[in-house]
Image: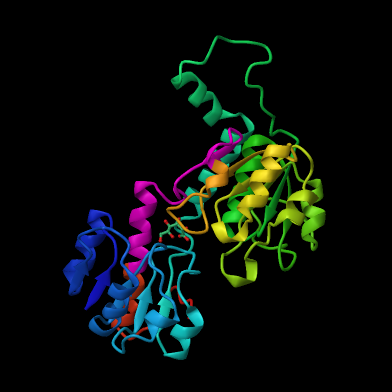
Amino acid sequence: RILVTRRWPEAVEKALAYKFDVTFNSDDKPLSKNDLAAAMGEFDVLCPTVSDIIDAGVIASGERVRLIANYGVGFDHIDIAAAKAKGIAVSNTPGVLTDATADLALTLMLMATRRAGEGERELRAGRWTGWGPTHMVGSALKDKVLGCVGFGRIGQATAARAHHGFGMKVGYYARREMPQAIEVDGTFYPDLEQLLAVSDVVSLHIPGGPETANLIDAAALAAMKRGSYLINTARGGVLDHEALAEALRSGQLAGAGLDVYPAEPQVPECLLGLENVVLLPHLGSANAETREAMGMRALANVEAFAAGKSLPDPVA
Ligand code: 8YV
């Protein structure tokens, strides 16, 4: 028995229902902790999303679930250690949403540097008075430095787009230098502050969770170049939003583009009144092709599990 906590693209739901006894959450709303806890005793497999918080308490609540097949690549909403301790397997959907998320990082980069959201708001509000040499002037990307914090699949795909498409130079901060499998030649910075100090645009591509919580805090924002930009398509918890709002107000940062927030769907109040931040509602993987591929990837893990084979995408 499988519980899918949200509605998936039709083709994937059909493929899953053809092979398994599946319950889809017909409300298509995030399940409460109580519902998730109850599900632990009723189903063999849970297919959650980022909006389902599966903490140690939920995991301890029932004995039936043997696989958590996450619909998404990030898994900081699941207590992996607690799952592992109970012998529950966890899988995710890596690779299939790399391009979509990198596309969105570039969307935010272009919107922030070219003041696209601000411009659209001005026009729709009837405040546009006409073309002008100094009207709504932004910043170019060509020859500027993109600093990627984290350089896994999505970081590299973002860097490749920025370099090959927009003529940016690339630097990256990661746990180790990554000479192989790099889609674009980038300069490795083993020290985060050094990368921040040389970057015109900083883009975050690290996983969420306790290890990276508030990595970009007031000190990190102060270490960035004055007048630079910050893009976040990773997780909201990696960034101190009060400090970001202050940096955007003071001109330390020229702009920012965010797709993720610490307690979604809440958006930090301090950002809502600022013109120089682009705010999107967690759209990183939101194109039809990607959402279907994510479902198929989750299905492949469920199938392998049901057949007693090793998981294609094990997290624990
Ligand atoms: C997904 C994401 O849409 O995969 C991820 O980690 O952040 C998103 O792009 C979401 O997680 C679905 O669960």
- For residue 10, which quarter of the picture? bottom left
Which percent across, then down, holds residue 109? 60, 39
Residue 248 percent across, percent down from the top left: 67, 40
**Quarter assignment of residue 38:** bottom left
Is residue 45 toward the left or the right of residue 49 in the image?
left
What quarter of the picture does the N terminus occupy?
bottom left
Residues 260 and 249: in front is 249
Q: Name the residue at 35% across, 68% down.
A: 48
Magenta region includes residue 238:
no
Residue 283, placed above or below residue 212: above
Q: Which of 236 and 138 is in front in this view?
A: 236
Residue 154: tell me if it is visible. yes
- Which portion, as a residue range, is magenta? 272-298
Judge whether 118 appears above or below 221 on screen.
above
Can I make out residue 310 in this image? no
On screen, residue 119 versus residue 195, left or right, reads left
- Quarter for ligand 1? bottom left
* The stretch drawn in magenta includes residue 279: yes
Residue at (41, 74) in percent of width and height: 54
Expressed as whole percent of the image width and height from the top left, the position of residue 297 reads 37, 65
- In-image side of 149 versus 44 (left or right): right
Question: x and y percent of residue 97 in the render?
Answer: 46, 55
